[in-house]
């Protein structure tokens, strides 16, 4: 016996004894009689099974190789036909190899190619060996939403003959149901493709890609068969409130690979690390006690965010002497702590009494150090 037969035997051995067989049941028995009308099969039940001559004609050799005592697999066609017989089929049982293959594919999640041969308003009909499978319209990736019935059928007709990647998602020989999904196959393919890409990537590598999705927490970029995430904190050196202000789907971007999680199948990317670093650029320009102009960018309970002219953003406590500020207000600040390596900038918000008076010689005192009496 081959592997398929062994699997079928195992499948049959796992089944509970069938006292009242039903249509679609797979049974095993022995040939006990042959005639011009067909075969009689001992199935170990109260009644023997009858294989009609018309069914024998569907098997490769017309049943010529079968003899009394030969063990065969059959499928129940009619538990009680018009003459009270238990009608079974050798031909349909041979299809059980396709059912076993479909079952294995469903368990492994492997992707197969299928070419639709027909359609109805619910989806596509696809051949699977000697079986007929079905892809529901809801499991097609490119089916537009909100189509009326006529437009949907026209769309489905255009897919006939095309090769589609599919995953088996339901196998029910008894009900003759074999359901496949293109949507889940595409998802599986993307996961496999991403794992392949991750294995070839190195942190620090620079790739060109295309923005595929813009979310509130960042943007996803396809870098050649795999999507990576540019977190909102890695979009730009300045604070970004809305990633959609910088990018939209379809934009071509250049990114750096900054994190690889092969176990979780995740890729972390960065746009800002390919741009000039304003913290490094300002390392020799900003120093503690310096007074600089800025603009209020964020408001919290007792602190504010302030952006300097160089593009850096720091934080400052809101002193009691300045009871109210608004976003966009122009202010003066004193540099309290500046750590370019740690990207840390702490400021002190100055009121009008803290700002030095204009220099009578016309020099700009906004970038002078605060002097104490």
Image: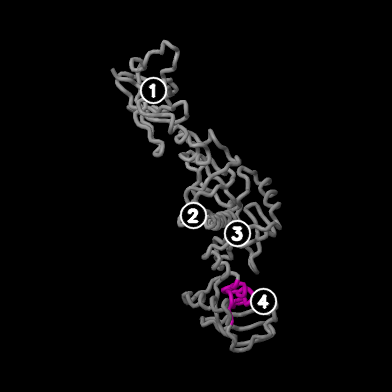
Q: How many residues crowd around disc 1 within 10 Å: few (fewer than 14), some, or many (20 or more)?
A: many
| Percent position of residue 209, x then y | 59, 45
| Residue denoted by label 4 | 55
| Residue denoted by label 1 | 291
Q: Earlier in the sequence, mark 1 or mark 2?
A: 2
| Residue denoted by label 3 | 166
Mark pair 4, 2: CA separation:
51 Å
Q: Looking at this view, is 109 or 31 the one in front?
A: 109
| Closer mark to the observer between disc 4 and disc 3 | 3
Mark pair 1, 2: CA separation:
47 Å
Q: Earlier in the sequence, mark 1 or mark 4?
A: 4
| Residue denoted by label 2 | 265
Mark pair 3, 1: CA separation:
65 Å
Q: Looking at this view, is 52 or 268 the one in front?
A: 268
Q: How many residues crowd around disc 4 within 10 Å: few (fewer than 14), some, or many (20 or more)?
A: some
Most extreme residue toward the bottom is 68
């Amino acid at each position: 016996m081959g592997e398929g037969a062994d699997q079928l035997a195992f499948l049959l051995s796992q089944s509970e004894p069938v006292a009242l067989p039903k249509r679609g049941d797979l049974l095993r028995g022995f040939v006990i009689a042959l005639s011009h009308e067909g075969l009689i099969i001992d199935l170990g039940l109260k009644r023997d099974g009858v294989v009609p001559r018309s069914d024998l004609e569907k098997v490769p050799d017309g049943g010529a190789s079968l003899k009394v005592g030969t063990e065969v697999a059959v499928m129940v066609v009619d538990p009680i036909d018009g003459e009270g017989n238990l009608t079974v089929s050798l031909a349909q049982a041979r299809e059980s190899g396709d059912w076993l293959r479909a079952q294995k594919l469903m368990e492994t999640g492997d992707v197969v190619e299928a070419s639709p041969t027909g359609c109805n308003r619910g989806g596509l009909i696809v051949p699977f060996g000697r079986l007929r499978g079905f892809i529901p319209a809801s499991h097609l990736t490119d089916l537009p939403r909100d189509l009326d019935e006529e437009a949907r059928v026209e769309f489905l007709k255009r897919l006939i003959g095309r090769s589609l990647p599919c995953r088996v998602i339901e196998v029910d020989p008894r009900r003759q149901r074999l359901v496949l999904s293109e949507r889940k196959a595409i998802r599986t393919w993307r996961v496999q493709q991403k794992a392949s890409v991750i294995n070839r990537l190195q942190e620090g590598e620079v790739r060109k890609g295309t923005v595929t999705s813009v979310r509130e927490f960042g943007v996803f970029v396809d870098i050649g068969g795999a999507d990576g995430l540019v977190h909102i904190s890695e979009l730009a050196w300045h604070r970004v409130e809305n990633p959609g202000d910088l990018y939209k789907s379809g934009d071509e971007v250049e990114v750096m690979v900054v994190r690889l999680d092969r176990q979780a199948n995740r890729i972390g990317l960065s746009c800002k690390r390919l741009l000039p670093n304003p913290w490094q650029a300002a390392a020799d320009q900003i120093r503690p006690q310096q007074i600089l102009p800025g603009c209020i960018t964020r408001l919290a309970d007792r602190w504010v965010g302030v952006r300097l002219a160089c593009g850096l953003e720091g934080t400052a406590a809101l002193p009691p002497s300045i009871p109210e500020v608004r976003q966009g207000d122009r202010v003066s600040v004193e540099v309290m702590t500046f750590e370019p390596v740690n990207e840390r900038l702490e400021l002190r918000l100055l009121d009008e009494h803290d700002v030095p008076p204009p220099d009578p010689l016309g020099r700009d005192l906004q970038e002078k150090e605060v002097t104490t009496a």
